[in-house]
Image: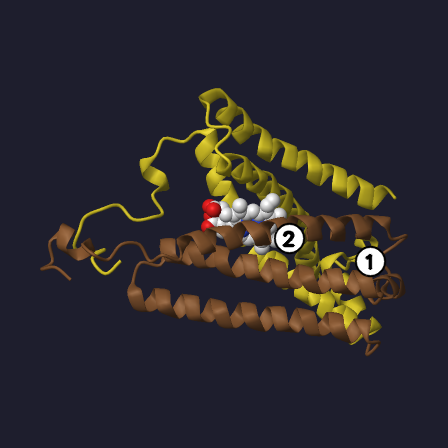
Chain colours: A yellow, B brown
Amino acid sequence: MAQAGTSNRPLSPHLQIWRWGPHMAVSILHRVSGNGLAFVGLALLLWWLGALASGPAAYATFTGWVWADLSTLDWSGLGLVTSLIRLAFKVVLVGITWAFFTHAASGLRHFVLDIGAGYELNANRTWSILSPVLAVAMTAIFWALLLLR
Amino acid sequence: MGNGTSIGRVRGLGSAKTGPHHWLMQRFTAIGNLLLVVWLGVSLLLLPNLHYQTVIEWISAPVPATAMALLVISTFWHARMGVGVMMEDYVHEHANKFACVAALNLITFAGAAFGVFCVVRLALGGA
Ligand code: HEM
């Protein structure tokens, strides 16, 4: 946008000039979750693959940070900092699965809109609300299956 | 090019003509991501545990290794296009935008190469 400064037209992000509704929320959620997956999810994926390819010690380091055994955490002195980081990693990992299901649900919604369906006001509104809700349910089911097996 | 009026700036230029291809590739890679990430999630759920030995034995077999390499390629391809769109939207200054997209290209190609290399190493028993 070479003329961006001269012509006085609004540039993104223009979240503040639209009235919020489920359709706008699901759209921005798609962007946020997609970029979260790209920056955080893919970095974790590479760490995981790199650790696997580097051997048992590297894999132990990876799991020790990303999914630490809560009972082994040390809360004194410097341990406080590293334990908080380990807790944060758990939030990040759950967050990344949530981001995937959220992005996948709104991505599937994109496919429906792409074929020209789902533009009726009520249908559009319903699926804007349902896709993130279904994604939260999928996240819960995934972690329940993983932790309870 | 025109003389700087709004109509003069766009007359004869048309669109960049690469939009439909970008749009379609975003969809193709999205389908790939959906299939492959769901495959990864289900596979991890089906493993008895996630200990090093268990994961290594699973991922180094031919079919999981192939799927994992494809997952790396599909997700990085999709992410490169998707993050690029985000940058085009939010980085308004020309030189900065160029620098961001250049860095994005270097990092995604490097990341995908590293991921595929790790899978190949695992599959060929180097680890
Ligand atoms: C798992 C790894 C994935 C990553 C890292 C990822 C990342 C991204 C990013 C960064 C964007 C750009 C968002 C924007 O500019 O608003 C995007 C767009 C998109 N993603 Fe994904 N995504 C992934 C998986 C998926 C899946 C599974 C689907 C489909 C079910 C999907 C469907 C889409 C679609 C349709 C778009 C284009 C939206 C548009 O045209 O505005 N993505 N993705």
Q: Which mark is residue B32?
A: 2
B32 or A37: nearer the viewer: B32
**Quadrant housing residue B2:** bottom left
Q: Residue at x 22, y 46 (%)?
A: A9
A71 or B82: nearer the viewer: B82
Which percent across, then down, holds residue B108? 55, 67
The answer to whether residue A81 shows anywhere in this view is: no
The quadrant the N terminus of chain A occupies is: bottom left
Q: Is residue B49 left or right of residue B103?
A: right
Q: Residue at x 67, y 69 (%)?
A: B115
Task: Kindly check if marks 2 and 1 are in contact, taking CB atoms under 8 A apart as contact.
Answer: no
For the residue labelled by badge 1, is the local secondary structure a helix, a strand or a loop? helix
Q: Residue at x 80, y 61 (%)?
A: B64
Ligand 1 within 8 A of label 2's CB?
A: no
Q: Is residue B18 left or right of residue A38?
A: left
For the residue labelled by badge 2, is the local secondary structure a helix, a strand or a loop? helix
**Quadrant housing residue B11:** bottom left
Chain label for disc 2: B
A84 or B15: nearer the viewer: B15
Which percent across, then down, holds residue B83? 48, 57
- In the rendered image of this protein, does residue A123 appear above or below residue B41? above
Q: Which mark is residue B85?
A: none
Which percent across, then down, holds residue A49? 73, 67
Q: Is residue B81 left or right of residue A12?
A: right
Instruction: Check chain identity for marks 2 and 1: say if they share one.
Output: no
- The span from disc 2 to disc 1 (Cα, nearest Å) is 39 Å
Q: Residue at x 13, y 55 (%)?
A: B8
> Seen from this angle, which residue lies furthest top?
A122
Looking at the rendered structure, the number of numbered marks drawn on it comes to 2
Disc 2 crowd, CA 10 A, few/some/many (<14, 14-19, 20+): some
